[in-house]
Image (cartoon, rainbow, N blue to C red):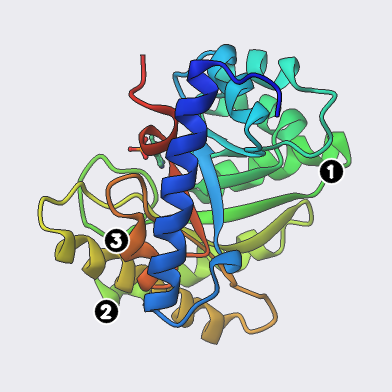
Amino acid sequence: MTNLSSLEIEIARNLDSVNNRISKAAKSAGRKPEDILLVVVSKKQPVRVVRAAMNVGIRNFGENYPEQAVDKIAAFIHDPNIRWHMIGHLQSRKIRIVAQKFHSMQSLDSLDLAVKLNESLGQEKKILPVLLQFNVGGELNKHGWEASKEEHWEELLPDVAEILKLPFLDVRGLMTMPPLEIEIENARMHFRKLYRLKEFLQHNFPQKSWSSLSMGTSVDFEVAIQEGATIIRVGQAILGTRV
Ligand SMILES: *Cc1c(COP(=O)(O)O)cnc(C)c1O
């Protein structure tokens, strides 16, 4: 092995520990660790940190702000294995950046945005994997379709039906960012609700495979895995505190 920098050593160590925890959580739920994609959230981290992460083998990165991601994406444009996932609320005027440069969009949170993103992708002649973001915790000011009350889930169906018709969006599943809970069991309740919502959508739109569930961050990814997450989004537990 070539000499690693201290930053690379630290990230490698964190990655190893997170991977072990993923394995344990998966096994405790009778699942296979390899069915869970770890997206490393690099928001607010400089290119230098992303490079160190790349050097220890990380290939899937999550970003919240397209305008901050462009420099990092450009720095590794020649690596065909790297994947950039958009995980934050997308403003209309930044849609083009996502259409052109990202490999997935996990935070699709309105029909209006879906229509505009589809249009932009059409110009690029590119089909993008997307997840629909739901607000299952009932917090005000949270992005995503309000889905805290199961008795209102029927009301979500018209928007979802419209989105499924958009040819440049490949809808793969659901994403949520629940309220930060002190009690881990409260987080579990939110993840369970997203899982049930996935089954509800699967039942109503059986022609689609609703296989992806993106939920869980540094503080609660193990619970998310136990409740069916197929994608977890982990930042600080791997890259350290954000600047
Ligand atoms: C920041 C962020 C994460 C990662 O949070 P960490 O605490 O760094 O693990 C995951 N998902 C979303 C949507 C985020 O904004």
| Residue 151 marker | 2
Q: Nearer the viewer, residue 77 or 109?
A: 77
Q: Earlier in the sequence, mark 3 or mark 1?
A: 1
The residue lying furthest to the left in this view is 183
Amino acid type at image mark 3: Val
Amino acid type at image mark 2: Glu
Q: Residue at x 56, y 28 (%)?
A: 92
Label 3 CA crowd tier, 10 Å (few <14, some 14–19, many 20+): many
- Circle 3 sits on which residue? 136
Q: Nearer the viewer, residue 141 or 49?
A: 49
Q: Secondary structure at mark 3?
A: loop
Q: Is residue 20 left or right of residue 118?
A: left
Q: Quadrant of the C terminus?
A: top left
The image shows residue 73 at horizontal and vertical percentages of 69, 22
- Circle 1 sits on which residue? 126
Q: Earlier in the sequence, mark 1 or mark 2?
A: 1
